[in-house]
Amino acid sequence: MAFTDKIYVKNHRQLASQLETNVPKSAFAGATLDMLFTGDGLSKLDSTTRDRILDFAEDFLDCDCQSNPYCGCPERKFIRYVLELRAQGLGPGAIVDVMTDDYMVYAYAGDVRSFLDDAVRKLEAVETLADVEGDEEMSSKARRARDRLSG
């Protein structure tokens, strides 16, 4: 299961009630992306909720791909966002708090921790392979990225 499959819409039942339609719990589900991409019914939402949803759409759904929002760009942008929060020194719980405040989405801290651990392990593998291949530049880049994520 991809990390972005574990990102959920906060208060999705309340949101569904306000929009008078079903809203999936998963923030990156096709139906959720459709709702955000088309913007139908967003005028029914209170201003705070609408602003956060529009911020999410602007920050993660904005790309020029033909198959937008199903191109994978939203998920990649969100992963980059989480990695940047970690590079700023935030732990899994704080990352969840920030994503909830910023976009009204959440994840379980354990899922964030697992994602970050997997990212560190992959960077270790890249560093090792780059060392074997004699690619000092790539090895150095992977080591710096790993160090930023490791804290």
Image: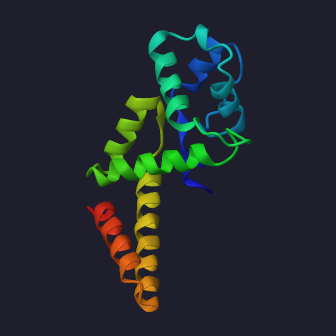
Location of residue 24 in the rendering, given as x and y in whole percent from the top left corner: 66, 32
Can you say whether 64 is above or below 102 in the image? below
Q: Which of 59 and 65 is in front in this view?
A: 65
Residue at (40%, 79%) from the top-left corner? 127
Residue at (60%, 55%) from the top-left corner? 2
Q: How many labels does the image show?
A: 0
Can you say whether 1 is above or below 135 in the image? above
Location of residue 37 in the rendering, given as x and y in whole percent from the top left corner: 65, 28
Give the position of the C terminus as an image quadrant: bottom left
Relative horizontal placement of residue 96, taking residue 5 as reference (left or right)? left
Location of residue 142 in the rendering, given as x and y in whole percent from the top left corner: 38, 72
Residue at (66%, 13%) from the top-left corner? 41
Q: Nearer the viewer, residue 116 or 37?
A: 37
Residue at (44%, 91%) from the top-left corner? 132
Relative horizontal placement of residue 139, taking residue 72 as reference (left or right)? left
Location of residue 124 in the rendering, given as x and y in whole percent from the top left corner: 40, 76
Task: Look at the image and name its color scheme.
Answer: rainbow
Can you say whether 49 is above or below 73 in the image? above
Q: Nearer the viewer, residue 81 or 111?
A: 81
Can you say whether 20 is above or below 73 in the image? above
Give the position of the N terminus as an image quadrant: bottom right
Relative horizontal placement of residue 127, taking residue 1 as reference (left or right)? left
Relative horizontal placement of residue 73, taking residue 133 as reference (left or right)? right
